[in-house]
Image: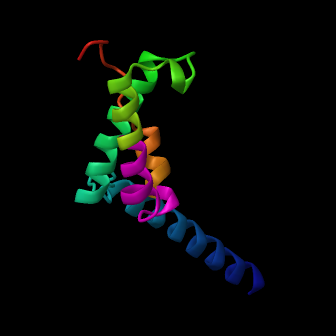
Amino acid sequence: MTSILLLAIGIAVAVALVGSAAFQFLTPINDDVLSPLEKKCQQIANEGYKIHSLYPDSNPENLLEDDMKRLLYLDDLWIKDCVSVLTADSIFSIVNNVERDFFYGE
């Protein structure tokens, strides 16, 4: 009797695990959907990264004046509109998805 009960419990656990795996596999995960604020923050991050990549080894004082003003403006937007509002997961997701494939001069 005990072995039948253990067999039934084992089968139930196996069915639950297979069902869970099938459910996760069949459920579409749509991480590409961003809120309007997250899209704005993604653009800010992309633009800031482009400026930072133009001057990888220099100090902020060595930036051209226009680039320095633009970078300070983007940093201010990033802090006020993104970091202070979005969750840490959203911020890390945005930072990890910065477009790194562009050509200088774009």
Using the rendered image of the protein, determine whether residue 31 is visible from the camera's viewpoint.
yes
**Residue drawn 45% across and 42% down?**
95
Residue 63 image-quadrant placement: top left
Whole-percent x, y for residue 48 in the image: 38, 34
Residue 10 placed where, x, y %?
A: 65, 71
Residue at 44% in and 66% down: 19
* Region rendered in magenta: 74-89
Would you say 3 lies left or right of 85 here? right
In terms of depth relative to the viewer, which is nearer, 18 or 63?
63
| Quadrant (top left, top right, bottom left, bottom right) of the C terminus | top left
Q: Residue at x 26, y 54 (%)?
A: 33
Q: Is residue 45 above or below residue 68?
A: below
**Closer to the camera, 28 or 73?**
73
Work out whether residue 82 or residue 62 is closer to the camera in this orientation and state it: 62
Magenta span contains residue 85: yes
Q: Is residue 40 above or below residue 16?
A: above
Left or right placement of residue 17 versus residue 10 in this view: left
- Asked if 82 appears above or below 64 in the picture, the reply is below
Q: How is the image coloured?
A: rainbow
